[in-house]
Image (cartoon, rainbow, N blue to C red):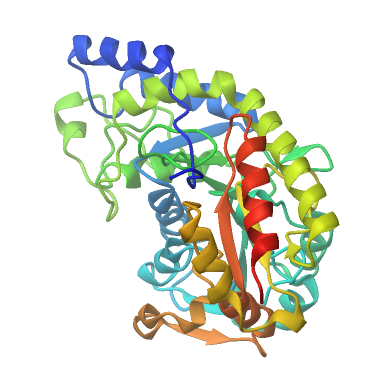
Amino acid sequence: MKYSLSNDTWDIQEIEAAHKVIDSRYFTVNGPHVKQYQEDFAKKFGSKYAVMSNSGSSANLLTMAALVYSGRLKRGDEVLVTAVSWSTTYFPICQMGLKIRLVDIDLGTLNVDPDALEAAITPATKAVMIVNLLGNPNEFDRIRKICDEHNLIMLEDNCESMGATYEGKEAGTFGLIGSFSTYFSHHLCTMEGGMNVTDDEELYHYMLSIRSHGWTRHLPDSSKIYKKLNDPFYESFNFIMPGFNVRPLEIEAAAGIEQLKKLDAFIEQRRVNAKLFKERIEKETDLLTQQETGKASWFGFAIILPEEKKGKRNAYIEALNAADIEVRPIVAGNFARQKALQFLDYSISGELKNADYIHENGFFVGNHSIEMSENINLLIDVLKSVKA
């Protein structure tokens, strides 16, 4: 592709780190690289604790499982979540016996509409999963006020928004637990990988256990959730809750240690790219794009047709494909229109008018961690050429 969705951010440092792990012959979780990467990650984002897993999807699963097993949420409780997000924002909620209530987005920011969020609250609502979409942080002052007034737990799916900040605070650290992804196309790449951050020591210990089958082996001796015996043989295969095997690899963590050192430079370049993209698309076209809240980390560039071009998306998709520009829906569009929803325990709050609009009239192209003025100029020229 002349313009792909993402770029390869690995260099010699990641390759050498991977070779060191191979030479060590220690490959799985709780090795020195996973421990260091978790410590480095927590420090970088200003959190007390971090738990690495094998994907951002698994990080969301650890979030929901830790809340249910700790008793913070109980099966049947309702969780509010926007109708536009990735599939594994939703699936773990229902997999843990909770109910989803879908809420509309703001058409400008593509994040949750705070008014719609507050209107969606029912007596069964106990938590909100705030999704920072495509690198854009939410209006956390308003959302925090809503959560406090209604005694709701705030959680964050920050898998697409590493490095974004709101009023100087890192996205992913506003909620009780925040999840991150380091899949290939994301801000950092560990091949596959996820991370949870929290300041709650008890939930941290739950996630350590749930990540590895629900056993006690990786819990600290001073655990908040279980008093370990002074018997390593017994504690090696001692299970205290239904867990999963969502453990990461040492080789992924080794790459993450090196990638994390480069994050600030990656985010700065993405913002430079976004500045050029916004300047050209706003000045030279009538197309709409995502409105920044706080300081976005620009996962990619969402493009939305204005009302007068509604229903004409195919002309743009065809032109982009012909120009070798990789293009995708805006995440999964309105998830209420995905067939998988029939298997979930869900309800819908009001009309999902804006989610429907981007489902039919939105599309997405990538942003990279390298200078890409040539790509962006090509993109804008192609968009301008479309007769729609």
Residue found 82% across the figure and 48% down from its top: 279
Residue found 41% across the figure and 44% down from its top: 207
Q: Give the quarter of the figure containing the N terminus.
A: top left
User: Outermost residue toward the bottom?
Assistant: 350
Against 293, residue 315 (above or below) is below
User: Residue 368 location, x and y as percent?
Assistant: 57, 37
Residue 260 showing in the rendered view? yes
Rendering quarter of residue 385: bottom right
Q: Give the quarter of the figure containing the C terminus.
A: bottom right
User: Residue 304 location, x and y as percent?
Assistant: 68, 69
Residue found 72% across the figure and 51% down from its top: 137
Residue 298 showing in the rendered view? no
User: Residue 180 location, x and y as percent?
Assistant: 52, 44
Q: Is residue 388 left or right of residue 213?
A: right
Q: Is residue 198 left or right of residue 332?
A: right
Against 43, residue 150 (above or below) is below
Q: Nearer the viewer, residue 325 or 98?
A: 325
Q: Nearer the viewer, residue 132 or 189?
A: 189
Rendering quarter of residue 170: top right
User: Residue 214 location, x and y as percent?
Assistant: 28, 47
Q: Nearer the viewer, residue 295 or 21?
A: 295
Against 107, residue 69 (above or below) is above
Residue found 34% across the figure and 82% down from its top: 343
Q: Is residue 294 left or right of residue 260?
A: right
Tally of numbered discs: 0
